[in-house]
Image (cartoon, grey):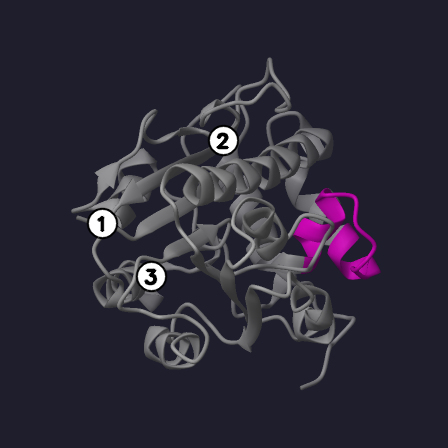
Amino acid sequence: MSIDPGVAHTSRIYDYLLGGTTHFAVDRDVAKHAFAAYPGGVDGARADARANRAFLGRAVRYLAANADLHQFLDVGSGIPDTANTHQLAQEVVPDARVVYVDNDPIVLAHAHALLAGSPEGAAAYLHGDLRRPDAILAHAAETLDLTQPVGLLLVGVLHVVPDADDPQGSVARLVDALAPGSYVVISHMTNEPLDDADLDLVGRRLDERMNTTNPPALRNRDGVGAFLAGLDLIEPGLVPVPEWRPDGTAEAGRRTPVLAAVARKR
């Protein structure tokens, strides 16, 4: 499975925004071009990428500590960093089991960093795609017990799957396969007006430069909320990422077009 350094990919652009080192010049160029139209420009996009990553940490810790979840399915996990899902969960429940899923070959190349966890727990990596939920479930069942509650993490992935690929159907298929008491965690960039920024222009610029199987798919608030239809939202509901159960570490004082929520399956 080859890595083309001349084609940008969402996971590497996200790594660049987070201040990582696993990206190419094309990823940096696309990010600078597209996010010039973002609220606060590239610096604003960097701030929201950090806020999104911090939300992941808060959500995983909440589910491990407050919902007593010991299993996680992280779809669109991205390039490993210093606070991956299994590390976050195993700080609270050492026997946590995690399956990571991503479709970027460079994530596969770094998957070893996702597999080193506590002796009591387990971690596995699947080179897969949200648009093929049955394949994800089949492989996840090798590590996770799907008859018991699971935390399904869809953090920063849904806004790169267009409606033509039926992401709502894929999410519904995954949720249907999970046991009652499971949770779904999402974050999603919207295209609703904010601070006079043209978020649809951000999407068009990403699309025109990336030539990827993950074109941008920004949605309005109702479109984001539709992914959680039939589930019970956990307080405070669907809110900007820094506002989901803040712990004092999130950057305050800026409005963001990235929404986040955690919901429970009855």
Q: What residue is pinned by disc 2?
A: 241
Residue type (three-letter) at the residue carrying disc 3: Pro
Q: Earlier in the sequence, mark 1 or mark 2?
A: 2
Circle 1 residues within 10 Å: few <14, some 14–19, many ≥20: some
Q: What residue is pinned by disc 1?
A: 265
Q: Secondary structure at mark 1?
A: loop
Residue type (three-letter) at the residue carrying disc 2: Val
Quadrant of the image for the N terminus?
bottom right
- The quarter holding residue 115 reads bottom right
Name the disc covering residue 167, or none.
3
Relative depth, front residue between 179 and 18: 179
Which x, y percent locates residue 167? 33, 61
Tell whether position 20 is magenta: yes
Between the C-alphas of marks 1 and 2, the distance is 21 Å
Q: Judge from the rendering whether residue 111 lies leftward or rightward of residue 58; answer left or right.
A: right
Between the C-alphas of marks 2 and 3, the distance is 21 Å
Name the disc covering residue 152, or none.
none
